[in-house]
Amino acid sequence: MSDLLSGGAEAAAGLAVHGARAIDEQSPASVRRALVADGVPGLLARKDPTLWGPEAEPAAAAHLGWLDTFHRSRELLPQLAELCAELGDLDHVVLCGMGGSSLAPAAMAATLGRPLTVLDTTDPGQIRAALGDRLDTTVVVVSSKSGSTIETDAQRRAYHRAFLDLGRTPEEAGRHFVVVTDPGSPLVETGLEMGAFVIVADPTVGGRFGALTAFGLVPAALAGVDVAELLDQAEEFAASLGGEDGNPALALGAAIGAAATAGYSAVALVPDGSGLDGLGDWAEQLLAESLGKDGLGLLPVVVDSPDEPGATGLGVLTVAYGGSLGAGAVPGGGIGAQLAVNGPLGAQFLAWEFATALAARVLGVDPFSQPDVASTKAHTTRLLEALPAEQPAFTDRALQVFPGRAIQVVPGGTIQDGGLADVLRTVLDAGDYLAVMAYLDRHDDAEIARLRSILADKSGKPVTFGWGPRLLHTAGQFHKGGPPSGAFLQLTGVVSDDLAIPGRPYTFGRLQAAQAAGDRAALDGRPLLRLHLTDRTAGINQLVTAAQAL
């Protein structure tokens, strides 16, 4: 560890990056020196759109506003203060948003201890539970950059119907909604027709870079977060971005880029115990969607603690994040962190965004595109009309086993006895990493998340866990566009009590099933295994037990 930290920390405005120099020295040539020699930090700080090549230039020119959006976001502060006062009697804040529209405010609320219910699911049970929770004092933030996000639209419709069923008039129901979207999106007109409060976001910022725009600030402010303080932290940190020295964001970006050129395949995002809860989930999307394309990128692995399996390992760049501790002081066993990023949340957002854009320059990819996300959406739209009938290869008590084309689990194939443990071993062995994708209820079915650490411990490989369909807006781009070295374990479950989507010819259960099927279609050709839980509780217990027995 002392060797890794021999270069000391690089700090500015209360944020420090430890260990970056040691990582940079592992690459064939210093990535940092190359970036500085080309003047990249200064060019990026000045919003030069040419840094990622001519094909990326149009998108970059339209989406570099995150570098100084904290200035424009200050114009929101009086409006947010007025909105909070107007809605002071509605103290249960529900955020309906996917990916970049929800992960940053979730991190803000969790870090600062403010209550915020994030609804980024289509699971009927989880939606029904949310609709039954303090509805009379609920304000719903409907957050979608495009204004056409299918999950968010379905959630908005369900909540609007619930308020009407509660006895609210259409005008009274509208008061329970705050719409956040880009100017000109169809959601602007919808929100105005509903009588909702409509706030337009900064159109010069892409979704996953929008932490400090209205998408992050509106729900966080309604939840009680002091968002002005976050803007202050970002503004103070921004002064360091163009420098060759004293530039922690440059150190972080060069280290991530160097790791990608020095044989690392994954980056573990580990909380160091000193605050900033939820930042790892936000950084996962930022790294996966910005870098995971053209067969390149580092797999982000979000772990809950430094001593959890998968936090370290061969080919894994371990990055600790938090508010105060350096890499050498990170609690937990093993070799500890190779990088540590410590500082206030507002500065963290800007540092990681800048670093990710630099790493994209090193990799030669466009950080502002997500070319493979649309494939699952297209498959989902098609499958909503007619879901294919599928027959399991076999059934083991509460689990039905559906192997993809690249996985054989029938007698005479890879699996001779059809046992569940053997099935799990097969999919574990099929890739350099395993992605567990659970299209289930993240609250009632939360026990299934234990699979990540169990399978990481059993395999010694990077294992990720994501809740569907949220994962489609986070790691999904990497799954389809990153290095084709992963294997995929998809989990679906029986829907015992479905829920209609007002004004739509399909239910939440059908939408969830179509999204899972669409994800499988987009991953066709990769090693994929689906396990369907015919009894969710029994199936989860059975699956966890089988994983522990490996």
Image: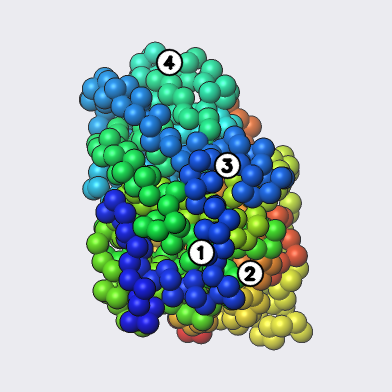
* Label placed on residue 48: 3
Determine whether the residue tagged by mark 3 lies in a helix, strand or loop.
loop
Asked which quadrant contains residue 502, the reply is: top right
Which color scheme did the rendering employ for the protein? rainbow
Can you see residue 532? no
Task: Say which residue appears at 60% left-offset and 45% top-offset.
Answer: 368
Between disc 3 and disc 4, the foreground one is 3
| Sooner in the amino-acid sequence: mark 4 or mark 1 | 1
Q: Which mark is residue 195?
A: 4
Dot in front, 4 or 2: 2
Could you tell me which quadrant the N terminus lies in? Answer: bottom left
Label 1: few (<14), some (14–19) or many (≥20) C-alpha neighbours in 10 Å: many
Disc 2, disc 1: CB below 8 Å? no
Residue at image location 43% in from the left, 37% down from the top: 68
Where disc 4 sits, the SS reads loop
* Vertical position of residue 354 compared to residue 325: above or below: above
Q: Position of residue 298 (x, y in %)?
A: 56, 65
Three-letter residue code for mark 1:
Arg
Amino acid tagged 4: Gly
Up/down of 368 relative to 393, above or below = above
Q: Quadrant of residue 35?
A: bottom right
Q: Are marks 3 and 4 in contact (CB under 8 Å)?
A: no
Q: Is residue 335 left or right of residue 430?
A: left
Give the foreground label among 4 and 1. 1
Residue sitting nearer the eye, 338 or 19:
19
Q: Earlier in the sequence, mark 3 or mark 1?
A: 1
- Crowding at mark 2 (Cα within 10 Å: few <14, some 14-19, many 20+): many
Residue placed under numbered mark 1 in the picture: 32
Instruction: Work out how far the residue at label 2 is from the one at label 1, CA to CA, in angstroms.
Output: 30 Å
Of callouts 4 and 2, the N-terminal one: 4
Q: Which residue is mark 2?
A: 486
Tell me the mark number nearer the camera, choosing from 2 and 1: 1
